Amino acid sequence: MATSSMPWYPTIFPEKCDGCAPFDKPKCVEFCPNGVFTFEDGKAVVAYPLKCVSGCTACEPLCHKKAITFPKREFAFAPVRSGDKGLLRKTMCVKCGKDFWTNRETDICMDCESKR
């Protein structure tokens, strides 16, 4: 089984993605609180994969074209430690004040973390 440090992020199949044309806005781009997606040339693109929260798949069911997929969970995660449920929690960054979702033990958002 892989370690929990294995990269976790969505893959978008460009041949399936229509940029949510029937809805006027790409749902995944609008939905993701961590800014993993951007909208380019009429399609959603995974522009910031490292901003994806490990284990989160909340955007996948939003896609009406089934264009978003994630790695299989059994290959991406180590066994859960006792007392660690890996649950997402909403918190505020202690540096910039931005609200963000995480399953890590830090209160610093990924934007501020990357500025180190």
Image (spheres, rainbow, N blue to C red):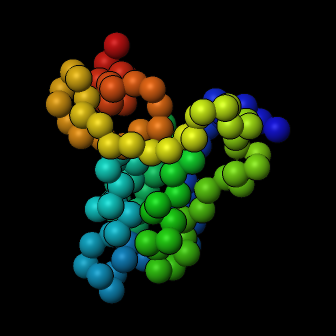
Taking the spot 54% from the left edge, 70% from the top edge, the residue there is 67
Asked whether 9 or 44 is in front, the reply is 9
Q: Quadrant of residue 111?
A: top left
Asked whether 50 or 104 is in front, the reply is 104
Rendered-image quadrant of the N terminus:
top right
Whether residue 42 appears in this view of the structure is: no
Single out the residue that lies furthest toward the bottom. Answer: 22
Rendered-image quadrant of the C terminus:
top left
Single out the residue that lies furthest toward the top. Answer: 116
Taking the spot 24% from the left edge, 40% from the top edge, the residue there is 99
- The total of numbered circles placed on residues is 0
Residue 4: image x %, image y %? 66, 33
Q: Is 9 rendered above or below residue 3? A: below
Residue 54: image x %, image y %? 54, 42
Q: Is 50 rendered above or below residue 96? A: below
Taking the spot 38% from the left edge, 72% from the top edge, the residue there is 19
Residue 10: image x %, image y %? 54, 54
Q: In which quarter of the image is residue 8?
A: top right
Residue 48: image x %, image y %? 42, 42
Q: Quadrant of residue 76?
A: top right
Single out the residue that lies furthest toward the left. Answer: 97
Asked whether 49 or 13 is in front, the reply is 49
Q: Is 109 rendered above or below residue 34? A: above
Whether residue 108 appears in this view of the structure is: yes
Taking the spot 57% from the left edge, 41% from the top edge, the residue there is 85
Single out the residue that lies furthest toward the right. Answer: 1
